[in-house]
Image (cartoon, helix red, strand yellow):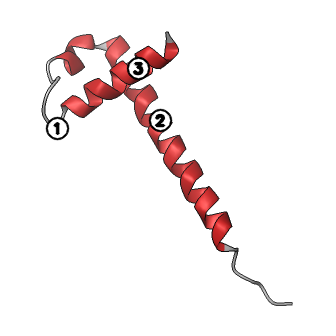
Amino acid sequence: MSIHPPQPWVWKGVVAGASQASLCLRLCTCAYIQSLAPSLLDRHKTGLSGIFWKYARIELNLCW
């Protein structure tokens, strides 16, 4: 019995699912941090660290 590698469409589904889960985890984590310590993310609204503030804002807008 030989084992065949999965078809390419299977890998595309796995990658899409993993990236969606990763994005959801980042959004939820940033919103959770924002709820615990708002000043931590509010200090850094611009620049590279501002991405986390934006993630938190996106999550809050999605939930409400």
| 54 is higher (above) or lower (below) than 42 | below
Name the element at disc 3: helix
How far across and how far down the image is residue 51, in percent? 25, 33
Residue drawn where x is 28% and y is 13% of the image: 37
Depth-wise, is mark 3 or mark 1 nearer the camera?
1
How far across and how far down the image is residue 31, in percent? 39, 21
Q: Amino acid at mark 1?
A: Leu
From the viewer's side, name the closer residue of 18 and 62.
Answer: 62
Name the element at disc 1: loop
Q: CA distance from mark 3 to mark 1?
A: 19 Å
Name the image quarter holding the N terminus: bottom right
Q: CA distance from mark 3 to mark 2?
A: 10 Å
Q: Amino acid at mark 2?
A: Leu
Name the element at disc 2: helix
The answer to whether mark 3 and mark 2 are in CB contact below 8 A is no
Residue drawn where x is 27% and y is 12% of the image: 38
Question: Which residue does the numbered mark 2 point to in the structure image?
Answer: 25
Question: Which residue does the numbered mark 1 point to in the structure image?
Answer: 48
Question: Which residue does the numbered mark 3 point to in the structure image?
Answer: 32
Mark 3 vs 1, N-terminal side: 3
Q: Amino acid at mark 3?
A: Tyr
Q: 10 Å neighbourhood of mark 2: few (<14), some, or many (≥20)?
A: few
Q: Is residue 64 left or right of residue 5?
A: left
Mark 3 vs 2, N-terminal side: 2
| 17 is higher (above) or lower (below) than 49 | below
Residue drawn where x is 42% and y is 30% of the image: 27
Depth-wise, is mark 2 or mark 1 nearer the camera?
1
| 10 is higher (above) or lower (below) than 51 | below
| 3 is higher (above) or lower (below) than 35 | below
